[in-house]
Image (tube, rainbow, N blue to C red):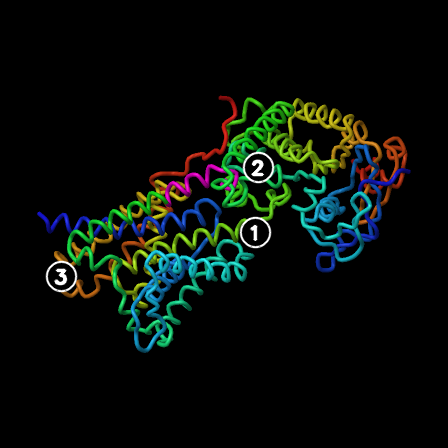
Amino acid sequence: MIGVISYLVFFATTASILAIAVLGLNLQWGNTGLFNGGVVAFFGAGAYGTLILGGTAQAGHLGGYGILYPLALLGGMVAAGLMAWLVGLLTLRLRHDYLAIATFGVAVAFENLMRNAEWLAGGAKGVRGFERPLREALGDGFLYNLIFFAAVLLILIGVYIFLERLVASPFGRLLRAIREDEEAAQSLGKNPARVRLTAFITGSVILGLAGGLYGTFYAFVSPQDVLPTLTFQIWAMLIVGGAGNNRGAIFGAFVIWGAWTASGWALSRFAPVDVQLYTGSVQFILIGSVIVGMLMWRPQGFLPERLVVSQRGKP
Amino acid sequence: MAEPILSTERLGKSFGVLKAVDGVSLNIRKGAITGLIGPNGAGKSTLFNLLTGALRPDSGTVRLNGQDVTAMAPDRLFGRGLGRTFQIPRPFARMSVLENVMLAPIGQTGETISGPFLMRGRMQQEEQRIRDKALEVLDFVTLGALADHPAGQISGGQMKLLELARVLMGDPALILLDEPAAGVNPVLTATLIGKIEELNRQGTTFVIIEHDMDFVMRHCDPVIALAEGRVIFEGTSDEALRNPHLLDAYLGAPADV
């Protein structure tokens, strides 16, 4: 029994962390129409940033600053935001598909940098020596995981409330206008370049927060954590849940992560042994099929965008 | 003539070998409803895009109230009192009609990422004011009842009225309308004209691109005609009707009809 509950907590923690990431992407794509094809780079910047800043001293690579955990997490978010600022200045002039290609390239470059620059983040071996916060007080057992889950859940709720307020404000109105028709918005006195950059950075900071929590949860991050697979997973979550709808984003994260985990389990249990070798590849095909299928038959997702309005006309 | 509200000097814009706008110099009189006519491909819309900053000219200058605004971005020109609509209406489709209009005022407190959180009280007061004004403007253009509708679902003519409403939120001194009557049913056209003339009496200057000669002759004065990127006529509507050049270039010889 405790085993099942323990597993559920583990599952829900990962799903909640991913839900935070999907919310960040939703601000960029769902609300502003920015096609970020390099989600994992900003997620990774948060994870690496947090672990390098908050870890213990290590030989051979940057890090071991042992900074107080909340500050380290904040540092990870800042790292993701700085990267988004730089990438945004260079690529945000690009429209839809070109922006997607450019950001995808950034993510591949990020992974390669992390894999090869050993002095920076341990290369292929990853960043080690990170101690999870309050570990001494809480130990490594079930209690720790439960409290960590509660903390992640609180952060998820906080991010959700922040974004809901934001999209219902004049700023949200501005984002939607840029998404719908940039030129028309500019003719009404709005500066699309600035708005796009602000939304891109804000979404990326949220992605960085998710990455920081992810790194904290595993107390480890390596180039294996920043593969394009994660970008596709997070996109699948948003598309399935419903782009433009924050509840849809969270729903999609749990559904897709559940399907991913279940398919992995089912394959390892029931598939012939020679297929089991390719579990990862089979899952990859499955997630691709889910994206294609949704886009063909229900492009608005399970929880479509509602007509979000900042103000109503007649009371 | 009093100082023009908008003027251009030898304005030029080419696309490859095509000279879309070829050395256009003109003055737009303050307080008038100027009609801009010309056959398809005469350069009317390109000229509009140069005047509103949507395109950068290759040569020449644009002055607004005597100040050089050549190649200034559209958002800054809107802030200086120049509003425009589009030939094909461009509503923010997945936003309500009211939100389309409430978007327009510039420098809103809640328009920044921190505003909705750090200056909540001020933002809410401002929202109340903007909402009241937006509903007033929507009533003015007869769209009041559609305030909560998605803007993508109203008719093409209503979209033209919506574009005018959006522009009015900025209290512009000069409004450029690109084919406001095209594809709009006669009843809505009459409504639109009525509103334009009412605003004009209150002091707003208009420049209107229009294909419908009848419309231009009845509602616009003066009239400017373009052909092949050049100004071929400038004068009153009566003069325009009697001008043989213009009839040739624009209407074609009677035998062709």
Secondary structure beneath label 2: loop
Give the x, y percent position of residue A313: 52, 25
Q: Nearer the viewer, residue B16 or B165?
A: B165
Label 3 sits on what residue type? Pro
Magenta stretch: includes residue A161: yes
**Contact, CB < 8 Å: mark 2 with mark 3?**
no
The answer as to whether the residues below labels 2 and 3 share one chain is no
Give the x, y percent position of residue B67: 80, 48
- Does B100 sit left or right of B1 as displayed? left
Stretch in magenta: A159-172
- Does A49 sit left or right of A192 as displayed? left
A98 to B64, vertically: above or below: below
In terms of sequence position, does the residue under pointer 3 or pointer 1 come before the other?
1
Q: Chain of mark 3?
A: A
- Does B127 sit left or right of B161 as displayed? left
Give the x, y percent position of residue B162: 61, 31
Residue hosting label 2: B103
Residue hosting label 3: A272
- Tell me the distance, in whole angstroms, between the alpha carbons under discs 3 and 1: 54 Å
Secondary structure beneath label 1: helix
Query: How many residues crowd mark 2 within 10 Å: few (<14), some (14–19), many (20+)?
Result: many
Query: How many residues crowd mark 1 within 10 Å: few (<14), some (14–19), many (20+)?
Result: few
Q: Chain of mark 2?
A: B
Residue depicted at x 48% and y 48%: A33
Q: Nearer the viewer, residue A122 or B38?
A: A122
Give the x, y percent position of residue A20: 34, 49
Label 2 sits on what residue type? Leu
Secondary structure beneath label 3: loop
